[in-house]
């Protein structure tokens, strides 16, 4: 059957379609034909056609003309653990996925206007609007309800999030918090100290605020670093803070390091304190830290099973220029482009099976959790090598490997990878339930400019400003029911 889709401007597309197609399939075809993003499709009575209905179910007749609205382009993709939110160029926000994790923002939709930035906890979102106010939605216990501090949320310039709480920095350097008190949602005890704050770092259940004078203020779960009184006299002239799940590490301008929080998660660095001099940068996973010194060497501490000890590869850790981490392992890129890994072998801590030869590593991404995981490395020639647990994408199927050419970027869920090629095509592998199989999109993953991931699903922004998602339907893999 033939269906015409027209815009108020007069531009139209004439399509040959199958009655079994959904209205969303029809819209996607019209978008490709017109070369721009479309919003709602309406019949000649002005009724909006449901995206999930088939063309036949929607009552569309052969030769009928439908009217379409123009959809604002997607500007930013943000993910909680089980939901996505997309910020559009008109300042509106659309969410989908697990409703309890922020996937349903209908209750605040009329407030989501002139949004400039969106941030997420594990199961909630918060948006900063152009006037500096904040709107939150999702799990109330994880920061999805900011009504208790709404009057204080004025002139907000930045948001930071733990797993279940938000912290907002206002233009005057003060801080407002909300969400689970045990995750840092209550900062009343340190309110008088939270002034002239320039940045905030978070772990799972605590916050650390770096003030303009180089001092640090902490709050949240004391066992996770929310109580820094034991090291407060050392927290002077701090330049940067990094965090594992339960501990913090502060790099001072002198190059030394101060740590606090749970000891076996990196909160105690006494064993390597004498080595932590001239530190340039620190990387962290769930339970260990790795510091790059100014001579290119590396010092590690924390849980040894997570990479807190690098004895087996220490001699090779020279001229390190970057370190990336999975949940329980580290991967260091050396100046010559070679790779050194350590930590849990099932999380990518053993890359001995990968032959890199002289091909230089450009980027590394990791999937997994604290017991299983994998790394995927983009090499300078645009090819990809993987290692770690096969169930988390550590092995690329033979039918997929030839497609991994000219790769520019990789994203990961907990058990799958998605590689964005320079030509805008996306290649996926790993657990299909976590986004490792995108074949259901029927070749629509081209002209992609950005990819984002929840735990179990991927979402991509296309050059035309439209959005596609795949993976676990319940956790963000199905966006067919929202107007993207």
Image (cartoon, grey):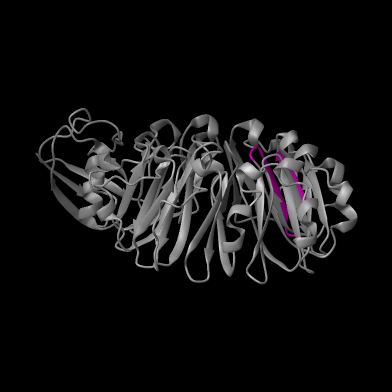
Snapshot quadrant of residue 483: top left
Snapshot quadrant of residue 474: top left
Residue 170 shown in magenta: yes
The one nearer the camera, 214 or 309, is: 309
Image point (37%, 33%), residue name: 433
Residue 28 versus residue 450 in the image, above or below: above
Q: Position of residue 280 (x, y in %)?
A: 68, 67
Q: Work out which quarter of the rendered image holds the N terminus and state it.
A: top left
The secondary structure making up most of the magenta span is: strand
Q: How many marks?
A: 0
Please state if 48 lies on the left or on the right of 80 as rendered: left
Snapshot quadrant of residue 295: bottom right
Image point (50%, 53%), residue name: 91
Residue 400 shown in magenta: no
Residue 306 visible in the displayed image:
yes
Farthest residue to the top: give it: 57
Q: Position of residue 262 (x, y in %)?
A: 76, 41
Residue 461 visible in the displayed image:
no
Image point (29%, 32%), residue name: 52
Residue 359 versus residue 446 in the image, above or below: below
Q: Position of residue 451 (x, y in %)?
A: 41, 52
Farthest residue to the right: give it: 233
Q: Position of residue 222 (x, y in %)?
A: 80, 38
Please state if 233 lies on the left or on the right of 480 as rendered: right
Q: Which residues are magenta?
A: 163-178
The one nearer the camera, 403 or 169, is: 403
Please state if 260 lies on the left or on the right of 326 as rendered: right
Q: Work out which quarter of the rendered image holds the C terminus and state it.
A: top left
């Amino acid at each position: 059957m033939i269906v015409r889709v027209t815009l108020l401007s007069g531009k139209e597309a004439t399509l040959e379609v199958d009655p079994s197609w959904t209205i969303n399939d029809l819209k996607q075809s019209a978008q490709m034909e017109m070369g721009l993003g479309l919003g709602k499709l309406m019949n000649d009575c002005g009724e909006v056609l449901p995206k999930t209905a088939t063309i036949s179910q929607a009552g569309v007749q052969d030769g009928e003309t439908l009217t379409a609205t123009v959809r604002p382009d997607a500007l930013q993709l943000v993910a909680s653990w089980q939901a996505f939110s997309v910020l559009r160029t008109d300042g509106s926000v659309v969410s989908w996925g697990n409703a309890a994790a922020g996937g349903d923002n209908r209750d605040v939709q009329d407030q989501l206007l002139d949004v400039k930035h969106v941030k997420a906890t594990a199961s909630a979102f918060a948006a900063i609007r152009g006037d500096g106010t904040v709107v939150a939605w999702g799990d109330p216990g994880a920061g999805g309800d900011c009504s208790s501090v709404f009057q204080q949320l004025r002139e907000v310039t930045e948001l930071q999030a733990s797993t279940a709480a938000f912290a907002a920095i206002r233009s005057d350097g003060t801080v407002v918090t909300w969400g689970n008190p045990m995750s840092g949602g209550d900062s009343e005890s340190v309110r008088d100290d939270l002034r002239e704050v320039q940045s905030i770092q978070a772990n799972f259940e605590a916050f650390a605020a770096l003030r303009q004078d180089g001092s640090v203020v902490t709050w949240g779960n004391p066992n996770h670093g929310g109580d820094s009184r034991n090291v407060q006299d050392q927290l002077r002239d701090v330049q940067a803070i990094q965090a594992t799940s339960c501990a913090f590490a502060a790099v001072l301008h002198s190059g030394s390091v101060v740590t606090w929080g749970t000891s076996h998660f990196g909160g105690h660095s006494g064993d390597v304190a004498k080595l932590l001099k001239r530190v340039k940068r620190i990387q962290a996973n769930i339970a260990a830290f790795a510091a790059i010194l100014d001579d290119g060497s590396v010092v590690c501490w924390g849980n040894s099973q997570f990479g807190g000890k690098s004895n087996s590869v220490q001699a090779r850790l020279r001229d390190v220029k970057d370190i990336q981490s999975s949940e329980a392992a580290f991967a260091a890129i050396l100046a010559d482009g070679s790779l050194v890994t350590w930590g849990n072998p099932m999380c990518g801590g053993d890359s001995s099976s990968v032959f890199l030869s002289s091909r230089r590593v450009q980027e590394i991404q990791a999937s997994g959790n604290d017991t299983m995981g994998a790394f995927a490395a983009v090499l300078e020639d645009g090819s990809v090598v993987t290692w770690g647990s096969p169930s988390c994408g550590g092995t690329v199927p033979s039918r997929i490997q030839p497609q991994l050419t000219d790769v520019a970027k990789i994203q990961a869920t907990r058990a799958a990878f998605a590689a964005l090629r320079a030509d805008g095509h996306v290649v996926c592998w790993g657990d299909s339930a976590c986004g490792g199989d995108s074949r259901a999109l029927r070749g629509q993953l081209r002209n992609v400019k950005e990819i984002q991931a929840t735990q179990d699903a991927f979402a991509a922004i296309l050059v035309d400003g439209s959005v596609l998602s795949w993976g676990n339907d319940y956790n963000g893999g199905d966006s067919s029911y929202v107007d993207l």
